């Protein structure tokens, strides 16, 4: 296969080449001021990102994992608390829980949205927890207090937040959104009667600016956003060794600050994010059209009426995943699996004592989904070729089955 017809899963070079001049200027500006960590470039980015997310405050930190850990700690999640989340996510979600000293517990996902199923959350709260006279919620698994829930807005689509907020209110849980894949995604809340940006719905939210995310730094970066000034101040202390004033440490904190260069780069790229997200949505519509026409046994993602996803990933449901992936690889098309092993079955969480079969939907999704190439600069010709190759693979498989 000729290399110039290869279609990468993700193209990180094109957007940076496109913005080379602006990004180089950021670097020069940082060199001239020698303000490398924190400072005005970080503060300006924080202001702009909070505005983009329609929240009041943003604390930029060194990664999405730190953003989530600091959000949990600032919200009062303590050591030996239980935090509820989903098994279909990147491990950073549960790492942040563990790093805050808490214990993750899982509820299954919705078969159509791939995100937290509010009915499963309700079932967990009603049948896997006890409530004492004071209203304190205790997990029956381990006898620990359940204090927070992290819905993950996976692949760029928000979880169904209204019923999650309602349950959280009823059971006194803090809601922290993992919006690390959902910069700019929107959710229509019946509760608030308006479209809301991912990250502006719960008590606080975490974003990652890992290079491959919809908004990515040229290195590691993240941010916590919130409408609560006290929470924002706490996150800013946690990221900076527990100090609000230099060498006056109110608590022990971390080194979780953001570099000025990364903040400047993110601020520049933020100016293009709405357009890039729009392009991703456009590509998703094109894939949907092509896949429907091809009728090749590959099912596009479900887009509920309350959701405006930003397609961080374009995840389709397939049969014969491994063979399809091999075929696409052999013709120069990159794909990915997000994620092959649900967290409750990862070796790292053997000590949580979950078993295969505990979260059947997450397990089915882990073995039957494939992420197709998705990035703003993807062309309609490339998309047509991806679907053409999926179609020919399917045709070959069907006729092989007929022969056998
Ligand atoms: C990327 C990601 C994170 C962690 O972000 P880092 O910046 O890599 O630390 C957390 N949760 C989800 C769902 C992610 O995709």
Image (spheres, rainbow, N blue to C red):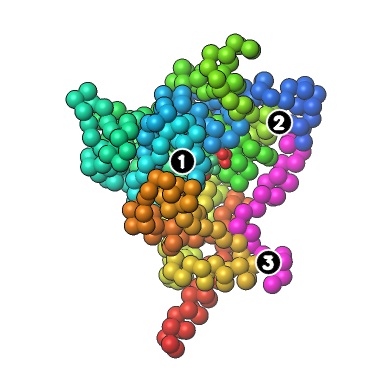
* The label number, if any, that marks residue 261 in the structure image: 2
Residue that extends furthest to the bottom in the rendered view of this protein: 403
Q: Position of residue 332 (x, y in %)?
A: 64, 67
From where the camera sits, is residue 200 visible? Answer: no
Q: Of tags 3 and 2, which is closer to the observer?
A: 2
Quarter of the figure with residue 362:
bottom left
Rendered view: 94 above or below 240:
below
Q: Position of residue 27 (x, y in %)?
A: 76, 32
| Quadrant position of the C terminus in the picture | bottom left
Quarter of the figure with residue 127:
top left
Query: At x 61% / y 35%, what residue is drawn?
Result: 221
Rendered view: 233 above or below 51:
above
Query: At x 58% / y 35%, what residue is drawn?
Result: 63
Does label 1 or label 2 sit earlier along the sequence?
Answer: 1
Q: Which residue is mark 3?
A: 5
Give the spatial CA distance, label 1 vs label 2.
Answer: 29 Å
Q: Which residue is mark 1?
A: 94
* The label number, if any, that marks residue 36 in the structure image: none
Q: Secondary structure at mark 2?
A: helix
Query: At x 34% / y 49%, what residue is drawn?
Result: 108
Give the spatial CA distance, label 3 vs label 2.
Answer: 35 Å
Does label 1 or label 3 sit earlier along the sequence?
Answer: 3
The boundaries of the magenta stretch are 1-23
Does label 3 or label 2 sit earlier along the sequence?
Answer: 3
């Amino acid at each position: 296969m000729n290399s110039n017809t290869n279609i990468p899963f993700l193209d990180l070079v094109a957007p940076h080449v496109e913005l080379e001049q602006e990004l180089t200027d950021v670097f020069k500006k940082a060199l001239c001021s020698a303000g490398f960590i924190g400072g005005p470039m970080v503060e300006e980015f924080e202001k702009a990102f909070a505005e983009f997310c329609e929240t009041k405050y943003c604390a930029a930190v060194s990664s999405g994992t730190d953003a989530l850990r600091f959000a949990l700690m600032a919200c009062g999640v303590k050591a030996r608390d239980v935090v509820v989340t989903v098994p279909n996510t990147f491990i950073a979600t549960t790492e942040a829980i563990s790093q805050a000293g808490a214990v993750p517990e899982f509820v299954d996902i919705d078969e159509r949205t791939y995100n937290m199923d509010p009915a499963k959350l309700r079932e967990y709260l009603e049948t896997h927890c006890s409530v004492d006279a004071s209203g304190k919620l205790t997990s029956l698994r381990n006898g620990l207090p359940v204090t927070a829930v992290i819905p993950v807005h996976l692949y760029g689509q928000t979880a169904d937040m209204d019923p999650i907020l309602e349950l959280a209110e009823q059971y006194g849980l803090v809601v922290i959104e993992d919006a690390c894949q959902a910069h700019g995604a929107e959710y229509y809340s019946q509760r608030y009667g308006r479209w809301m940006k991912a990250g502006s719905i719960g008590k606080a939210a975490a974003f990652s600016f890992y290079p491959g995310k919809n908004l990515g730094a040229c290195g590691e970066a993240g941010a916590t956003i919130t409408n609560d000034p006290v929470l924002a101040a706490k996150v800013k202390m946690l990221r900076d060794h527990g100090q609000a004033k230099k060498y006056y440490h109110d608590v022990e904190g971390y080194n979780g600050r953001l570099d000025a260069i990364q903040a400047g780069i993110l601020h520049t790229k933020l100016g293009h994010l709405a357009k890039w997200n729009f392009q991703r949505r456009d590509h998703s519509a094109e894939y949907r059209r092509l896949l429907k026409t091809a009728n090749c046994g590959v099912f596009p993602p479900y887009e509920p009426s309350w959701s405006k996803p930003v397609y961080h990933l374009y995840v389709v449901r397939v049969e014969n995943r491994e063979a399809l992936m091999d075929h696409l690889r052999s013709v120069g098309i990159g794909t990915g699996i997000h994620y092959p092993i649900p967290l409750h079955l990862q070796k790292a969480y053997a000590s949580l004592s979950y078993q295969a079969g505990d979260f059947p939907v997450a397990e089915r999704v882990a073995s039957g989904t494939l992420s197709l190439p998705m990035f703003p600069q993807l062309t309609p010709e490339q998309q047509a070729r991806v679907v053409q190759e999926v179609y020919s693979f399917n045709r070959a498989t069907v006729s092989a089955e007929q022969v056998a």
